[in-house]
Image (spheres, rainbow, N blue to C red):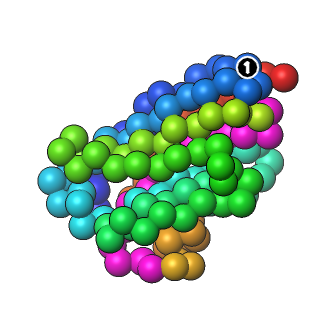
Amino acid sequence: QVQLVESGGGLVQAEGSLRLSCAASRRTFISYDMGWFRQAPGKEREFVAALSSTNNIYYADSVKGRFTISRDNTKSTINLQMNSLKPEDTAVYYCAAEHALGYPSIARPKSYNSWGQGTQVTVSS
């Protein structure tokens, strides 16, 4: 497993932007498929975006065109740039890592064994 630490959450007004980062503990980070998920109160954890080790990118329909996932292998980090935020984007955001998932497994929370502690994103209307 790999240890993951998210940062960058906070409170923002609707239509604002935030950038989340997830730092991985291993230099073998480059070999992992990485995902961002979120969980709102009373709801199940849901897929947001994923970036495979082969640089395939996937987004949930709800965030397409607004969110961008990227990887910095030199810093062993994965980022989520979130623009045009909406109140319904409010949730705890988690990053996750796993090997060799492929699609659609890369979009399923149960596919991942390594998770960060989460970072709160709150979007006010």
Q: Quadrant of the N terminus?
A: bottom left
Q: Which residue is mark 1?
A: 13
Q: How many marks?
A: 1
Residue 51 is situated, as x and y percent measured from the top left of the image, at: 43, 61
Q: Is residue 33 visible?
A: no
Residue 78 is situated, as x and y percent measured from the top left of the image, at: 37, 46
Q: Assign a secondary structure to mark 1.
A: strand
Give the residue furthest to the right: 125
Quadrant in the picture for residue 113: bottom left
Quadrant in the picture for residue 92: top right
Q: What amino acid does circle 1 point to?
A: Gln
User: Is residue 74 rendered magenta in the image?
Assistant: no
User: Which one is in front, 102 or 41?
Assistant: 102
User: Which one is in front, 57 or 35?
Assistant: 57
Residue 39 is situated, as x and y percent measured from the top left of the image, at: 67, 48
- Residues drawn in magenta: 87-102
User: Is residue 93 rendered magenta in the image?
Assistant: yes
Instruction: Judge left or right: residue 98 versus residue 36.
Output: left
Residue 50 is situated, as x and y percent measured from the top left of the image, at: 49, 60
Q: Is residue 123 above or below residue 22?
A: above
Q: Local crowd at mark 1 within 10 Å, few (<14), some, or many (≥20)?
A: some
